[in-house]
Amino acid sequence: ASQSKDEPETYDFIVVANRLPVDSVTDEAGNQSWRMSPGGLVAALEPLMKSTDGAWVGWPGAADVVLEPFEHENIRMVPIALDEGEVERYYEGFSNDTLWPLYHDVIAQPSYHREWWETYVAVNRRFADAAARIADQGATVWVHDYQLQLVPGMLRESRPDLTIGFFNHIPFPAYGIFSQLPWRQQIISGLLGADVIGFQRVADAGNFTRAVRRLFGYETKGTRVWVPVGDSSDATTGDRSHIRGAPVRRVIARAYPISIDVTSYVELAQKPEVQARAREIREELGNPKTIMLGVDRLDYTKGIGHRLKAFGELLAEGRLDVQDVTLVQVASPSRERVASYMQLRDEIELTVGRINGDYGSIGHTAINYLHQGYPREEMVALYLAADVMLVTALRDGMNLVAKEYVATRADLGGVLVLSEFAGASDDLRQALLINPHDIEGVKDAVMRAIDMPVAEKRRRMRALRKRVLENDVIKWSRVFLEELKHSTTAHPVSHDH
Ligand code: G6P
């Protein structure tokens, strides 16, 4: 990092994300320290951050935590403080009760509140200013996800020297849905401040470029968008009459499907103690013939209710019996102060209780429901123990659980049942693909997974593993950043396509 007197240190590679990649831990003596979060994004960027003089701008995850920048495992952390009201309006409100349901095809009703929007703008400004303050001349800034869609535009304005990337980790909805948003134009112009805008699926990138055409009339071709430079009237009026030959910036909008830190999962799955734990789990569950597994944040996008309905009906119809089969559902707590999440929790727990009450027997529980988060070792042990993995999302940007399951199954055992509404289904074609809304279809897929001949299981898992092992998250970030390097529009280009 370079530093001159009285100036903040500056960096040539900056990640901007809602959350910092560290969790605060406090030991028994009350000493606070930081631990690297287990997420895949951290794994993808860690080597790069360390080798290229990088900094990470993010929120520490609790209200009113005001911290000076600090170093953790050689990464410069730049914390952004949010007060109670900002957490309510920017994080719980606009991010998770407006954008999240809207971008997931309005599975839950999005709320539109002008105060939330105002705070979203103000907090995005705070993140952008923090990044601008610490960016070297000509630095690369990579902004992440729906919480920060205005940051690329704000940075482009204050720091035209920067190369700016944006990656949207969640789906981008069709225009007919996106157009509900009262601030749809501001969001699109915010994103268009980036040189490269990454999406999970080809369809997401297509939805985005269509929104650009509908709202602004800018020219788009495949993954390219031509944005007039310095003509902000276009950006606000949607005027389609910008003149050919006028200076434009070329923005790339395309799919870069994210993945996991494959090696770490493969290695964990090879550990004797993890394999022993997998056997122990099977035993603790009473050695059922079939263990089915669901692993999700407790979120209404994950289709947990649909999955339980299918399982409950199979038990009711006698196609499954608790003597032979059990479902382990890990539902990790998430966004617990948002009303739709509270309601979901009540619904799911009512359903679990009913199914267990109606079909369980002493010593044989239908559903082992765990409203807890677990360390990675335990998750991998669960994956190894699971004969059938159920991913029934109603809408999901990618779904990394599906990829984690596949990565751990070097034994070529296990069957993945995967929703076609998860981005992962674009790649993982050898899973049993389902439409989670089609309950009969889900039930048939579950039965087929349970009864699948070993040879077919192995053939499918081998093909799935090939896909996952070839495309890990390190490659994902490399491909994105390569494209970014070649697409920088720090200097306007002429309209020469
Ligand atoms: C999704 C989003 C992330 C988010 C994560 C956990 O994966 O794409 O941006 O961090 O959910 O949600 P939380 O609200 O706890 O950060």
Image (cartoon, rainbow, N blue to C red):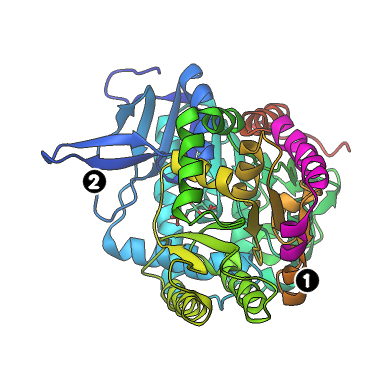
- What secondary structure is found at the residue carrying circle 2? loop
| Residue 451 part of the magenta segment | yes
Q: Which residue is mark 1?
A: 441
Q: Is residue 23 magenta?
A: no
What percent of the width, then of the height, locates residue 310? 66, 74
Of badges 1 and 2, nearer the viewer stands 1
Quadrant containing the C terminus is: top right
Specify few, some or many for label 2: CA neighbours under 10 Å numbering under 14, 14-19, or 20 or more: some
- Specify the quadrant that holds the N terminus: top left
**Disc 1 packing (10 Å; few <14; some 14–19; many ≥20):** some
Q: Which residues are magenta?
A: 446-471
Q: Main secondary structure of the magenta part?
A: helix
The kind of residue tagged 1 is Gly
User: Residue type at mark 2?
Assistant: Val
Q: Is residue 459 visible?
A: yes
Q: Is there any visible trace of residue 168 in the rendered image?
A: no
Q: Position of residue 277 (x, y in %)?
A: 45, 40
Q: Residue at (60%, 42%) from the top-left corner?
A: 404
Q: How many numbered discs sit on the rendered protein?
A: 2
Q: Tell me the CA gap for discs 1 and 2.
A: 51 Å
Residue pictured at 71% horizontal, 41% vertical: 256
Against 477, residue 48 (above or below) is above
Residue 66 is marked as 2
Instruction: Report which quarter residue 99 is drawn in.
Output: bottom right
